[in-house]
Image (spheres, rainbow, N blue to C red):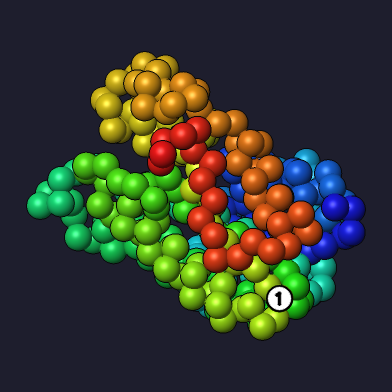
Amino acid sequence: MGDGRTVVITGGESGIGRAAGRLFVAGGDRVFLVGVRADALDDAVREFGAERAGSAVADVTDEGAVEAALRAAGERFGAIDVIFSNAGISGPIAPIPDYPAVEFAQVMAVHVLGAFHVLKHGLPRMRDGGSVVINSSVVGLTSDPGISGYATAKHAQVGLMRTAAKECAPRGIRVNTIHPGPTSTPFQDAIETTATGLPQAEAARAFEEMIPLRRHAAPEEIARTVVFLASDAASFITGATIAADGGMSV
């Protein structure tokens, strides 16, 4: 890296999004973080340095707010080179007959409509030859009981990615999804404790029994996959589903 690209990251205030921002900045890029928590966004900008980082508060389900955030990114740092669409929520865990329809719709809205908004208003602001990475999940390749909302949304992101990859190919813009397995973040902690009903440490151990590598990923490990897909080293990779899941989808 080191070429001073402009990188937009949604869900950029914490977890995998913030870890990716940290790596992009360390490589010489500029990052514009979009999220819903102003305090956490401000903290990340202070960490990365105001000359290299900016932010905007936006809920990705709000098309106007997404458009305004992407416009602000362009005004701050110029044309966009990389988009990491990372914002997400987990939703409830329940069998389909018991799954609340309103919460199913909300999970779909954040993951699918949100990613669509980011692409709709981000792609026209991107330079040719850029890279888009959408953060799906291992359950965008598989699924489990009780997660119909989350798994459906994560599968749907793959369809959006494949369409965008073909549409963007004439501009040399590559579009891919990543599919992380369990990653050590507060987001994942909440999923695991809800799913198992166990205290966090016990819930984590239960999940690790399902991972062939027998451990969670660190956020930085998933972030490195994002940075790779955004780099020239991945120049012939588009329309791909990249698993970073410790072997869970095998």
User: Percent position (x, y) of residue 27?
Assistant: 84, 47
In terms of image quadrants, where is residue 122?
bottom right
Q: Quadrant of residue 138?
A: top left
| Residue at position x 46%, y 21% in the image | 214
Q: Secondary structure at mark 1?
A: loop
Question: Which residue is the site of mark 1?
Answer: 172
The 10 Å Cα crowd at callout 1, few under 14, some 14 to 19, many 20 or more, is some
Left or right side of 134 for 158: left
Image location of residue 17, percent across then percent down? 62, 48
Q: How many marks?
A: 1
Measuring 30% from the left and 33% from the top, which residue is drawn there?
194
Residue 54 in view, yes or no: no
Residue 4 appears left or right of 147: right
Locate residue 138 relative to residue 5 in the image: left or right: left
Q: Nearer the viewer, residue 216 or 203?
A: 216
Q: Is residue 148 above or below residue 163?
A: above
Q: Position of residue 36 (x, y in %)?
A: 54, 55
Front-lying residue, 207 or 38: 207
